[in-house]
Amino acid sequence: MALLQNKVVLVTGASRGIGRAIAFKMAQEGANVAFTYLSSVEKGQALEAELSALGIKAIGYRSDASDYKQAEELMNSVVADFGGIDVLINNAGITKDGLLMRMTEEQWDSVIQVNLKSVFNLTKAATKPMMKAKAGSIINLTSVVGIRGNAGQANYAASKAGIIGFTKSVALELGSRNIRSNAIAPGFIETEMTGELNAAATEEWKKSIPLKRGGQPEEVADACVFLASDMSKYITGQVLQVDGGMLT
């Protein structure tokens, strides 16, 4: 039997890259998938059709996860449309890189708002239906940058480090209600975003990774399946690095 048969999964920021791969893996494992997109309307609508073709229920919602009210309304819609929520995957995120001395207040604020506040918004909204069901798995996408930092990404690293502290705190608060909270820290994953880097820089990255290659979005999605399923039912408060050994 599929690992996530009939579970209801919500994935934020799923129109491309890692989020899209996660939505597909969830559907392939039998989950009914709710997902959000914001600017990529056509991609969002196309994804809904592709997921539905796998024989599961799939609904895409145009919603800004960083907006507290929209996050609340989204959760109400998902619970109404699907009958509940079993798994929340906070994946929505942006980068606005720059050295600290040149970083604007807007670059700082927008990255913290989208990457960190969205996790608070959706997790808070999910706690009510999950507590009612006395079960749930919350999976937050952080980054190896949130563990070790990265020059030119003070805002991004701070947001991703914040997610780790938040994840562990939620695990402590909600464990007694049978709600688990874990984080996944991807390393260098080959997506549309990394495809914009120059080839020489990409090769340098790969040389520094023990497995000598970049990761695939599907490999991050596999880790999500594990943390969403009952295979990980005694695991909470953890950060799972999917980085090819980069931070070993």
Image (cartoon, helix red, strand yellow):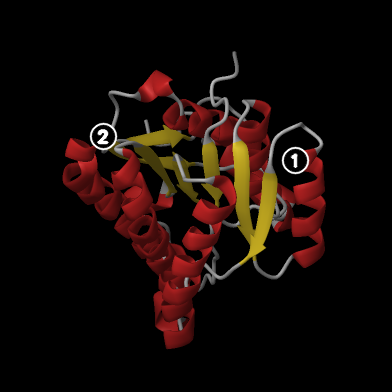
Residue 51 is marked as 1
Compared with residue 82, is residue 120 higher up or lower down, i.e. above or below? below
**Which residue is located at x 54 percent, y 21 percent?**
3
Residue 165 at x, y = what percent? 25, 53
Say left or right for 211 vs 178. Answer: right
Q: Position of residue 97 (x, y in %)?
A: 52, 70
Q: Is residue 214 visible?
A: no
Q: Is residue 101 above or below residue 6?
A: below
Task: Please tell me which residue lies in front, 155 or 21.
Answer: 21
Q: Residue at x 42, y 73 (%)?
A: 68
Q: Secondary structure at mark 1?
A: helix
Quarter of the view holding residue 101: bottom left
**Amino acid of disc 1:** Leu
Local crowd size for mark 1, using a 10 Å CA cut-off: few (<14), some (14–19), many (≥20): many
Q: Residue 122: in sight, yes or no?
A: yes
Tell me residue 40's x, y (percent).
74, 65
Residue 125, image quadrant: bottom left
- Are there few (<14), some (14-19), or many (20+) residues within 10 Å of tag 2? some
Residue 9: where, in percent of width, then height? 53, 42
Which residue corresponds to mark 2? 178
